Amino acid sequence: MFFKPDILALFVGALLVSSMLLYADYFGVKILRHWDIRSGSELQLALERKTYLITTLMAYAFAFQAASLFLFICTADHLHVFFTGAMCAAGSLNVNPWGYPAAVFKVVNFLLAGMWLTLNYADNQGYDYPLVRQKYLFLLAITPMILAEAAVQGAYFLDLKPEVITSCCGTLFTSVAAKGFFSELAILPPLPTQIACFAGLAATLITGIFFYRQSKGGYLFSSISLLTFIISWLALFSFICLYIYELPTHHCPFCILHPEYHYIGYLFYLLLLGGGLAGLGVGLLMPFRKTTSLEKNLPAFQKRLTLISLFSYVLFAALATYEIVFSNLTLK
Amino acid sequence: MIELKDITKVFNAGRLNEVVAVAGVSLSLEAGQVTVFKGPSGSGKTTLLGLIGCMARPTAGRIMLGDREITSLPERFLTAIRRQTFGFIFQQFNLLKGITVLENIMLPAYPTGESYAALKARAMELLELFNLENKAAAPVEWLSGGETQRVAIARALINQPAIIIADEPTAHLDTRLSREFMEIMRQFRAAGKTVFIASHDPIVYDSDAVNRVVDMRDGQVIVSRAA
């Protein structure tokens, strides 16, 4: 293991989030078993006081969890100087079997943590803890994923050996050489992916505007938004990257994080994750629109999420179009 | 209007210095009346007023304010209720030294976001009501005992609350000022406001401005009777 500040921050952060989550789960089981808002018992009042504290702490923990995705990518990218053969995070993550699974866990858990934060925010809008049970059930459900991430990320950092000679993006994410699940996902044929990506973005825009104006079709918008998130993610590696690098065969998802590309990758990832998460949040909250204490505030919150999602996707599309139009590369 | 259901408040629960301040109190308190909680020190009357005014949460039990249950409310909802529903008059009056009478009165209304001009106009109306308009720009440390008391009452009224809560308001006042205070409470009652006072001062609980007296001892209600 390398004792670098960013590695230690991620390592200790994951341990803290995991321990807090386990305690919140323990408390969540109590909530699920004993919660009765109509009761004025000492236990019920204690649960009401404590849930406020615990969810506030968990909100900060999950905010860190979400932000740690970017710290992880940045750390992996900076680590490449320690490994022979590595030129970016693609090589650093490839030095042991835990790197890429850890990155995937980070992305998935970003979305899960974000969904929990959305649920928690919505619950806080009601005066009678309307989503308290759902919130803790969700917490219990995502616990294995967060713990698995902590374990896999920990294994990745502990298993970093500087003598390892690794392959980098030139081998892993180049059309002519790509092998393996992640590599093959990254080099889908550009033209169909391009059509699917822009069609998905257009569909998200149309359903989003419809939901925003009519307050109908929330599930449809959410589903299309999720689909667009996945397609756009693949599109970024499949063809957008090519225009950024101005190389027809280079699909690396990490080189775009480098200063020579103006760190544009971070913005692409942020927009995609923001769009996907906000869109998912709309669908997540749909079942609770009729809850008495939420019916006033929840539709407005969903509209805000819709706007965030649409804004993120539109900006993503604009940025991708800019890169395509002003690139010296032509794919024909 | 306010219903207390089996309210218990324990401080330092589970420790050697555990104190049961209020023990299983159930009461129905009418709106538009002056109610006095009477009892010796340590009888739980101040704690009970604090619970009614959402200043603290009970350890067990529920409080209904109208048709709304308030003990389970998260803090941000309680803050709004405290601000909009209750006006507090404290034993020491707790005016802030170093700022003027007018600023002291306006202070509890600042978080509401109301325009400064509207607030100032309302504060000046209150000062006129209590014949203090010429003291508006004076620092509070220049005021006499009676003036301090009236400024504290004006401050409690700035957010136009439906309920006034006064904790031992006459503890530091002479007989004349205490009677004056009760006269103001009578006017509040006539204006339709609900008043809760914690006091062991006979001038307060024997006043004909009072509708109801709740006798307390050891955290329990001994008797609740019409005055």
Image (spheres, rainbow, N blue to C red):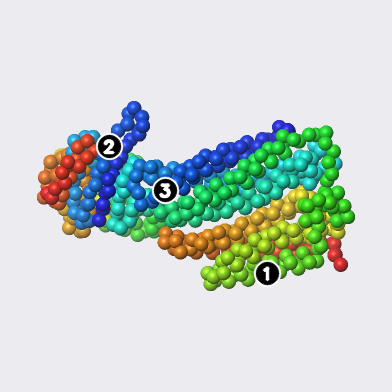
- The residue that label 2 is drawn on is B21
Vertical order, A322 against A257 (above or below): below
Q: Amino acid at mark 1?
A: Ala
Going 83% across and 49% down the picture, which residue do you hit? Answer: A172
Camera sees residue A111: yes
Q: Residues within 10 Å of mark 3 (few under 14, many from 20)?
A: some
- The residue that label 1 is drawn on is A202
Q: Amino acid at mark 3?
A: Trp
x, y percent for residue B40: 19, 36
For the residues bearing labels 2 and 1, Cβ distance under 8 angstroms: no
x, y percent for residue B4: 26, 49
- Distance from disc 2 to disc 3, alpha carbons, whole Å, reads 26 Å
x, y percent for residue A156: 72, 39
- The residue that label 3 is drawn on is A35
Disc 2: host chain: B
Going 54% across and 48% down the picture, which residue do you hit? Answer: A139
- Distance from disc 3 to disc 1, alpha carbons, whole Å, reads 44 Å
Q: Nearer the viewer, residue A223 or B215?
A: A223
